[in-house]
Image (cartoon, rainbow, N blue to C red):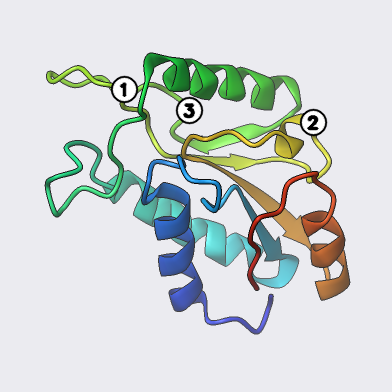
Amino acid sequence: MDDGDLDLALKAVVFSAVGTCGQRCTSLRRAIIHEKVYDEFVSRLLKVYPTIKIGDPFDSQTLCGPLHTKAAVKEYEDGIKDILKDGGKILHGGKVYENSNGGNYVYPTLVEIKWDAEIVKTELFVPILHLIKCSSFEEAVKINNSVPQGLSSGI
């Protein structure tokens, strides 16, 4: 919301969306952001996301480890295609991360998309975060409740 602590929210959003490479059912999939702070908050995310260390999960500096299978990498790639098909815009990421160790690594991805796009209703277990603008608390609740899944939510 527009009166939230953006520093605290930034830390929580990044860790929740990326910390397990999006592979837990409580990973953050949709950040519903009040229009009064949307541009500032997205700007902050766009400064942090390029600094996220991708790699060995046993390295204490790594935030984004690998996806568990090649099938999960395909889910990520298919999700990106569906996002673009649904009119979404990739702000960061959106591709497989190539490294010398091989593995199932992808870039944590930020997407601007309409809240009612079909792909937003699909729970992808990958590090894709949909950024959605709202104008009020009531609208945020409506958006939050518009998908069939909903294991956790927070404001």
Q: Are marks 3 and 2 in contact (CB under 8 Å)?
A: no
Residue 15 x %, y %: 40, 58
Q: Dot 2 lies on which element?
A: helix
Closer-to-camera residue (126/26): 26
Q: Is residue 108 left or right of residue 122?
A: left
Q: In this view, does 34 lie to the left or right of 147?
A: left
Residue 4 x %, y %: 60, 81
Q: The residue under label 2 is which amino acid type?
A: Glu
Location of residue 70 by image quarter: top left
Q: Which mark is residue 124?
A: none
Q: In this view, does 76 lie to the left or right of 141?
A: left
Quarter of the image where the N terminus is located: bottom right
Q: Which mark is residue 104?
A: 1
Judging by the rendered image, the residue that carries numbered circle 2 is 118
Spatial CA distance of label 1 from label 3 is: 14 Å
Spatial CA distance of label 2 from label 1 is: 26 Å
Q: Earlier in the sequence, mark 1 or mark 3?
A: 3
Residue shown at 47%/51% (left/top)? Answer: 17
Q: The residue under label 1 is which amino acid type?
A: Asn
Q: Dot 3 lies on which element?
A: loop
Give the mark toward the camera: 1 or 3: 1
Q: Dot 1 lies on which element?
A: loop
Closer-to-camera residue (3/154): 154
Q: The residue under label 3 is which amino acid type?
A: Gly
Judging by the rendered image, the residue that carries numbered circle 3 is 94
Q: How crowded is mark 2: few (under 14 residues within 10 Å), some or many (20 or more)?
A: few
Residue shown at 45%/15% (left/top)? Answer: 71
Residue 151 x %, y %: 65, 55
